[in-house]
Amino acid sequence: MTERVATFADRLGPARLRAARHALTIVGLISLPYIIFINRDRSLFGFDAHAYWAIDLSNLYGASTSNTSDLDAFRYTPAAGQAFAIFHVLPWELFFGLWFVAMVAALIWLTGRSWPLLLAFPPVPLELYHGNIHLFMAVAIVLGFRYPVAWALILLTKVSPGVGVLWFAFRGEWRKLAIAVGSAAAIAAVSFVVAPDLWRQYVTTMVNNLVYDPGHAYPVPIPLPIRLAISAAVVWWGARTDRSWTVPVAATISLPIIWFHGFALLVAAIPLWREDRGRAREAGQARDADRRRVDVAHAASGSSSIGA
């Protein structure tokens, strides 16, 4: 894949690449204001984030029963709800302003100076508009390779994208797997001790949502069990071939419901692909150095035999 991308870039040439970059950046900078404008009468700016702000622990899942897409439907674990509850002390406008800045900061951290260009990828401005947690999940996946505890964010919110932790199992990195799963389990255990009934409500709500018919097809109507199997296979292939960028791909495929802005999670593949490419380059340089040493040793041994 790396070689194909490099070949394509060489064919375009630096001038065309620069023009394409500038064009996409312009499109990206226009896209978010455009999305806000066209949706101003149809949905709230920060629609998903409002559910994180409007937490009521006495009725955490009241708006989520037989509801997967209306305002304030909260479907994460009670542990996440208990953590988000603190946000309600802030006025909504201040909370979403800070949340929006944090989303942009996450995008910049993931992509560097190219972040305005990523706004031309429609799911990204849609994610910024809705205020979901996909960009934060992307950060957690990237950090999770070095700090497995970061996987707790995913395992305690959308849960099913946690299939990505199988990376550690497929590579025999059992300590990292134990940290990733164990940290989430420890937080969940404390949450359960504090509010066991919330966990009963959570399970009931999730079962209800599984059989709920919203009256319209979801953007990706493939059942979750099938997508989870595909995701596990993607992670296995990535783990066996040292392609870490496959983990956010698998996590995206295994989202509970794949709304269009959920594809913003794929942004995590960019820094991971860069790291994969860097490792491959270093490994290639190491192999070249080894071959040169072998060639020098052979030449030296040949010279010695002739002199003898």
Image (cartoon, helix red, strand yellow):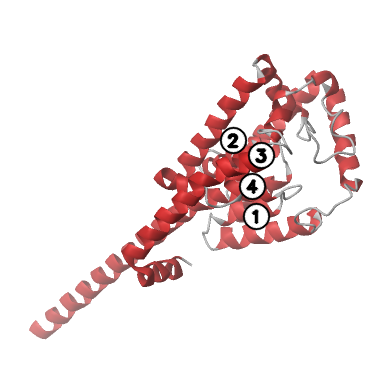
Specify whether residue 19 is in view: yes
| Residue type pointed to by label 1 | Ala
Specify whether residue 308 is in view: no
Callout in the foreground (4, 1): 1
| Mark 1 vs 2, N-terminal side | 2
Name the quadrant containing residue 253: bottom right
Q: Which element carries disc 4, helix, strand or loop?
A: helix
| Residue type pointed to by label 2 | Val
Q: Which residue is mark 3?
A: 154
Q: Which residue is mark 2?
A: 149
Give the number of the disc on residue 165.
4
The percent coordinates of residue 53 (x first, y second) are: 70, 24
Callout in the foreground (1, 2): 1
Name the quadrant containing residue 131: top right
- Name the quarter where the C terminus is drawn: bottom left
Asked if the residue at tag 2 contacts the one at tag 1, i.e. Cβ–Cβ closer than 8 Å, the answer is no
Spatial distance from mark 2 to mark 3, Cα to Cα?
10 Å
> Residue extending furthest top?
89
Q: Which residue is mark 1?
A: 250
Spatial distance from mark 4 to mark 2, Cα to Cα?
11 Å
| Mark 3 vs 4, N-terminal side | 3
The percent coordinates of residue 3 (x first, y second) are: 42, 69
> Is 1 located above or below residue 195 in the figure?
below
The percent coordinates of residue 68 (x first, y second) are: 82, 41
- Taking the spot 57% from the left edge, 26% from the top edge, the residue there is 97
